[in-house]
Image (cartoon, rainbow, N blue to C red):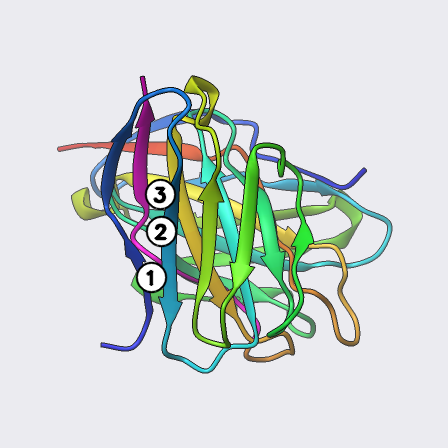
């Protein structure tokens, strides 16, 4: 099925460990995004990539890095995990222009940092 | 700064009752507006969206939303709620409406809907 695939679905890290969250889309979308979801705070943008070859910071980028590997893939890296990064992470992709503009979300990665 | 507010954190309704979820935004111009639904443990699914034109938009699963410019609101409604509608609902806006944008969405805090039989 066409869509956005995230791996892994669940992960437990120890403080200070690193890991990379993977995201791939097969809809030929130009733009991709990483959000984190915390209770009562909605979704907050971490980083985004408007098109292949570009990345920009969002609202909460500290402690994260991203790579737009190609048009399909957009990874999120935690270099030194902290308990404050315990969250559910969502990747999304979209076309930019109306009327096709609108996000398609992955199913999320639930990350716990202990 | 742009913001999106969903005033109700949690709403409980009886099955068959009508539903209205509120969403307000702060922005000078008309943004692009969206409602998403999230079932437990799942990603977000698009219910409906508004870009321009008719201010009453129809979505999937029997939902509709009305854009009111004077009130900076985009409230979600359903005439008769089903038990399967229990989920969390998010309003989202793109404040960079018009022309090519970078597509960033700003989300509200979410409203959890509980449906009683």
Residue bearing the label numbered 2? B79
Label ID, residue B62: 1
- Residue range of the region highlighted in magenta in the rendering: A101-114
Between A12 and B89, the one lying in front of the other is A12
Residue drawn at (84%, 56%) of the image: B29
Q: Looking at the image, can residue B78 be seen?
A: no
Rounded to the nearest angstrom, the CA distance separating label 1 from label 2 is 8 Å
Q: Determine which quarter of the picture holds residue A101.
A: bottom right
Q: Determine which quarter of the picture holds residue A113.
A: top left
Earlier in the chain: of badge 1 and badge 2, it is 1
Count residues near mark 2 (Cα–Cα under 10 Å), then give few for <14, some for 14-19, many for 20+.
few
Classify B111 as above or below A84.
below
Count residues near mark 1 (Cα–Cα under 10 Å), then give few for <14, some for 14-19, many for 20+.
few
Rounded to the nearest angstrom, the CA distance separating label 2 from label 3 is 4 Å
Q: Which chain carries label 1?
A: B
- Between circles 3 and 1, the one closer to the viewer is 1
Evaluate whether label 3 is on the same chain as label 1.
yes
Between B45 and A9, the one lying in front of the other is A9
Q: Which chain carries label 3?
A: B
Q: In which quarter of the image is the C terminus of chain A?
A: top left
């Amino acid at each position: 099925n066409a869509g956005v695939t995230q791996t892994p679905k669940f992960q437990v890290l120890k403080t200070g460990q690193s890991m990379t969250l993977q995201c791939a889309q097969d809809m030929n979308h130009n733009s991709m995004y990483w959000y984190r979801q915390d209770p009562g705070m909605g979704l907050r943008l971490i980083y985004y990539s408007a098109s292949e070859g570009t990345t920009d910071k969002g609202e909460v980028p500290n402690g994260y890095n991203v790579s737009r590997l190609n048009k399909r893939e957009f990874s999120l890296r935690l270099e030194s995990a902290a308990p404050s990064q315990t969250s559910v992470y969502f990747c999304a992709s979209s076309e930019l222009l109306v009327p096709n503009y609108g996000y398609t979300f992955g199913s999320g990665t639930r990350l716990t940092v202990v | 700064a742009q913001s999106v507010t969903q005033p109700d954190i949690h709403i409980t309704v009886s099955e068959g009752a009508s539903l209205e979820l509120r969403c307000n935004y702060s922005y000078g111009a008309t943004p692009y507006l969206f409602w998403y639904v999230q079932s437990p443990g799942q990603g977000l699914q698009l219910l409906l969206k508004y870009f321009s034109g008719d201010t009453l938009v129809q979505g999937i699963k029997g939902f509709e939303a009305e854009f009111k410019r004077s009130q900076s609101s985009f409230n979600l409604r359903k005439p008769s709620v089903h038990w399967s509608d229990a989920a969390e609902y998010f309003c989202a806006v793109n404040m960079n409406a018009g022309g090519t944008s970078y597509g960033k969405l700003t989300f509200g805090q979410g409203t959890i809907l509980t449906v009683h039989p």
